[in-house]
Image (tube, grey):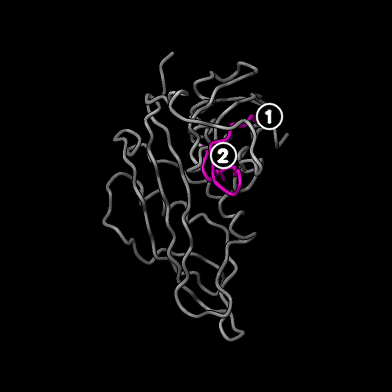
Amino acid sequence: MTRLTCLICLCVMSILSFGQNDVSASFPGGDEAYDAYLQANLIFPDKAIESRTTREIRVVVEIDSTGKVRIQEYVYPNSGLGFEEEVKRFIDHMPLWNPAVHNGVVANSQMVLNFNFTYIDPEIDFDTQRYTYYTESEVPPTFVGGLDSIKRFVKTMMVDTFNFDFDTVEATIQFVVGADSSIIDAQVLLSDNQIPDDYWVYVIRSLPNGIPGRIRKKRVNVQSTLSLVIVSEASDDS
């Protein structure tokens, strides 16, 4: 089986507000809803995958009084690798935000949005003898948005990125959530064999927004096991 040649991680950094509005503009549902929306809708550009490029894209946006988000400027020069075009597509299709309120009146506002596109070569395998992990922790590792967010991300990768056609797929995967929030190891324990194991490993190692487990308030590497049942949109609609 041909091994996959890239690993991607998509995450959003903190949202910074300019100005002194009484209430800042916000994504409907809050930060967790925004993270889940980003995971399900932002796509790593093909050109960037081919060039194995990692890039941070930072944009200044305006949220008008109706909640519409518009890009005003990119902070960095254009990469020429499709990152900016993908960020524009993502922002153009966003739902309306909750607009800012200034002195009791709905108002326009500005924010800076950060998008981190990270390329990791999956040919670089982690040697399990080179790092220590725990099988249990006082505070277990989690992900922003919880299980539903993970399922949305996995479905997007399997359907939109890899073009798998299925009604329902199932797998149980064991992996380690690193102290730095990365997924540093993964293996398929059980699956229905509709999707090759390499793809499951690729997608799980791509998971963004991991929250590390903790022991005595210190972040540590913790092993987790996740059983997933992914239902396609076609099956959802039926």
Quadrant for the N terminus in the image: top left
Could you say which disc has been placed on residue 229 in the image?
1
Observer-nearest of 160 and 175: 175
Residue 94 image label: none
- Numbered disc 2: secondary structure: helix
Total numbered badges shown on the rendered structure: 2
Distance Cα–Cα, label 2 vs label 1? 13 Å
**Which residue corresponds to the image point at 33% horizontal and 61% vertical from the top-left?**
74
Residue lying farthest to the top in this orientation: 1
Tell me which amino acid carries mark 2: Phe
Q: Quadrant of residue 32?
A: bottom right
Q: Position of residue 110 (x, y in %)?
A: 45, 71
Image quadrant containing the C terminus: top right
| Percent x, y of residue 89 | 44, 51
Which range of residues does the magenta coloring cover? 207-229
Query: Element type at marker 1?
Result: strand
Residue 216, magenta (yes or no)? yes
Residue 130, horizontal then vertical, whole percent = 43, 27
